[in-house]
Amino acid sequence: MGKDLLGLHRKILGGRKAILGGTSMGAATSLFAALEDPSSVAGLILANPPTCYETRQKFIPMYRESLELARSAGLEEARRASEQKTRPPIFLETECGRASFDIGWETKLEMGLDRYCAALEGAIESDLPSKDQLRHLKVPTLVLAWKSDAQHPLESAELLCEALPNAQLVVAESWAQVQDLPRHMRGFLQTLMEPQ
């Protein structure tokens, strides 16, 4: 996916520097793209990075179970099963938070079965880049995270900020602070645009 993102970047921007970013798997994809060609990346915004390394291993059986259910019974059944699982508490604080969580499933349904299963296969087989690789990536990076999300633990965000030499971390502790994350993104983008 990182190579696909770079290919898209080259086709659309013709080699001009870009700011890459994403949430969860999108954050990992952006990291791999930046490692592949750091000279084409002006900055990274990594929101809610996924579990990694040892912590990730306990989620692999859950990903496999979701994959098998989707293949055998379809996306709607996979969605029904996911609704039985615990949601991150920060999303339960407000109606807006609950609705935002549900948008994620609407997006997954729009992907269609084949792409949804491919994403799960990628989640099973993949991990974040190694800490040694991350230490060589000097691209300015903003890492956004929130507390109490088992699949996207704060520890992953902290680990990224420790390994990446030019990273800053913003942690939301409430839904109101999650809604304020775009302000931090705008501030980060403004610093990238300032003359060096």
Image (tube, rainbow, N blue to C red):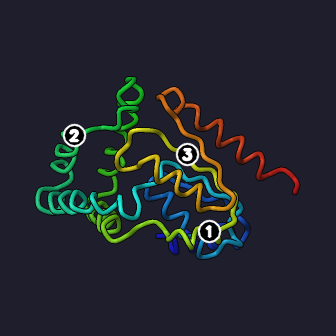
Q: Amino acid at mark 3?
A: Leu
Q: Report the disc number at residue 102.
A: none
- Residue assigned mark 1: 135
- Asked if residue 4 lies left or right of residue 78, the reply is right
- Which of 97 and 116 lies nearest the eye of the viewer? 97
Q: Tell which tag, 1 or 2, sits nearer the viewer.
A: 1
The structure residue drawn at horizontal position 22% and vertical position 45%, both measured from the top left corner, is: 82
Q: Amino acid at mark 2?
A: Glu
**Sequence-earlier tag: 3 or 2:** 2
Q: CA distance from mark 1 to mark 3?
A: 19 Å
**Sequence-earlier tag: 1 or 3:** 1
- Which of 4 and 193 lies nearest the eye of the viewer? 193
- Asked if residue 84 lies left or right of residue 41, the reply is left
Q: Amino acid at mark 1?
A: Arg
**Residue 196 position (above or below residue 181):** below
Image coordinates of residue 3 in percent, x first then y, are: 52, 75
Where's the C terminus, which quadrant?
bottom right
Q: Report the disc number at residue 144.
A: 3
**Sequence-earlier tag: 1 or 2:** 2
The structure residue drawn at horizontal position 55% and vertical position 53%, both measured from the top left corner, is: 46
**Residue 149 position (above or below residue 10):** above
Q: Residue furthest right?
A: 195
**Residue 110 position (above or below residue 15):** above
- Which of 69 and 55 lies nearest the eye of the viewer? 55
- Residue assigned mark 2: 83
